[in-house]
């Protein structure tokens, strides 16, 4: 356990980390805007090429989606453990100072004191989470190649997540510790399930789309956690004399509200499709999912 704590919270590279435009890769506004523009351009170009080619069936990707799910699960698990141990270490090392300001560890998790700089253990793992967002972007290209419904709808949500994680570092935004803990924990469960299904291992329920309820449960839990924590940040900001990075937090709240609208819109439309007996877009992460949908649609046509 001591070895794990050292490598995830006490290593000199972690303790001495500092978010710097000169030293941290991807830390400039020009890089962020260029990366998002390139991501959007490549996604739209790939979608247009497949559409002009008349390709309606999924493009065979072999084990690529499963490998991506495994990589995301492992990266998320590492970041979760790292920021958890780093937060405990920060609480241990700064408890003497908090006693003077009457600050509790829970308040610190939601509300960084004014003047907090993006340096140290917690921001190292926040930087790691920011970099992992670019690995997550590959999910969009996989969805486009699989000819999944709403593949282009992922563009906004994935771009928003990259922007939010950048703002957390750039403005030392409050609330990011809880946000990263909840997001990485959800990713471990979701991508772990997708990997499990992708390699053909048995799952509860036995269906090819068995990961969909897991994905929905994690999304609901994540949105609920974000809502409660955002209210907590607002209350602490008003009662404790201010939280660091509150301007970025407001922008973050707007993006989260937009993601919530997209989430509700998707599930309302899905409920309508279910009532009409149409095929549903269950994100199961396995080629077998498409076979299930195709067989289901062909059987429906035969009955008609």
Image (cartoon, helix red, strand yellow):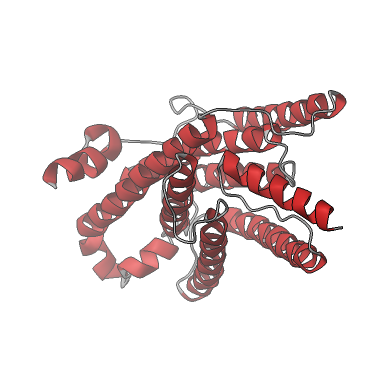
Determine whether 41 is above or below 132 in the image. above
**Number of numbered tags placed on the structure image:** 0
Q: Quadrant of the C terminus?
A: bottom right
Q: Quadrant of residue 247?
A: bottom right
Task: Give above or below for 132 relative to 274.
Answer: above
Q: Residue at horizontal 40%, vertical 39%?
A: 75
Q: Residue furthest front?
A: 302
Left or right of 251? Residue 270 is right
Q: Classify residue 58 as left or right of residue 238.
A: right
The image quarter containing residue 110 is: bottom left
Could you say where residue 66 lies in the image, as x and y percent from the top left?
Answer: 49, 36
Q: Is residue 47 above or below residue 194?
A: above
One can see residue 123 in this view: no
Q: Between 71 and 13, which is closer to the camera in this rendering?
A: 71
Where residue 145 appears, x then y in whole percent? 68, 31
Residue nearer the viewer, 260 or 264: 264
> Residue at coordinates 24% horizontally, 44% vertically from top-left?
9
Who is closer to the viewer here, 24 or 100? 24
Residue 27, above or below 302: above
Q: Quadrant of residue 4?
A: top left
Q: Position of residue 190 (x, y in %)?
A: 48, 52
In the image, residue 100 lies at what x, y percent?
A: 26, 69
Closest to the observer, 151 or 85: 151
Residue at the far left in the pictured view = 2
Q: Is residue 65 visible?
A: yes
- Locate residue 196 relative to residue 279 in the image: left or right: left
The residue located at (66%, 48%) in the rendering is 157
């Amino acid at each position: 356990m001591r070895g794990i704590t050292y490598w995830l919270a006490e290593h000199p590279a972690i303790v001495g980390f500092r978010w710097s435009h000169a030293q941290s890769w991807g830390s400039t506004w020009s890089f962020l805007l260029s990366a998002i523009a390139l991501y959007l351009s490549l996604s739209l170009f790939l979608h247009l090429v497949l559409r002009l080619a008349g390709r309606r069936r999924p493009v065979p990707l072999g084990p690529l989606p499963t490998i991506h799910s495994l990589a995301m699960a492992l990266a998320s698990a590492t970041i979760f453990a790292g920021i958890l141990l780093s937060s405990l270490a920060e609480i241990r090392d700064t408890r003497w100072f908090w006693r003077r300001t009457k600050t509790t560890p829970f308040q610190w998790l939601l509300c960084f004191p004014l003047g907090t700089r993006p340096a140290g253990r917690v921001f190292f793992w926040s930087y790691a989470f920011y970099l992992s967002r670019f690995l997550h972007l590959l999910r969009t290209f996989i969805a486009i190649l699989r000819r999944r419904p709403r593949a282009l709808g992922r563009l906004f949500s994935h771009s928003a997540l990259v922007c939010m994680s950048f703002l957390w570092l750039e403005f030392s935004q409050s609330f990011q510790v809880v946000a990263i803990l909840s997001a990485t924990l959800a990713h471990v469960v979701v991508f772990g399930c997708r990997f499990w299904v992708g390699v053909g291992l048995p799952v509860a329920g036995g269906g090819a789309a068995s990961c969909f309820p897991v994905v929905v449960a994690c999304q609901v839990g994540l949105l609920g956690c974000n809502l409660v924590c955002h209210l907590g940040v607002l209350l602490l900001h008003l009662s404790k004399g201010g939280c660091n990075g509150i301007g970025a937090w407001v922008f973050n709240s707007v993006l989260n509200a937009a993601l919530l609208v997209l989430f509700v819109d998707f599930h309302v439309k899905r409920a309508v499709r279910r009532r009409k007996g149409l095929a549903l877009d269950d994100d199961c992460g396995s080629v077998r999912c498409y076979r299930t949908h195709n067989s289901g649609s062909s059987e429906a046509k035969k009955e008609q």
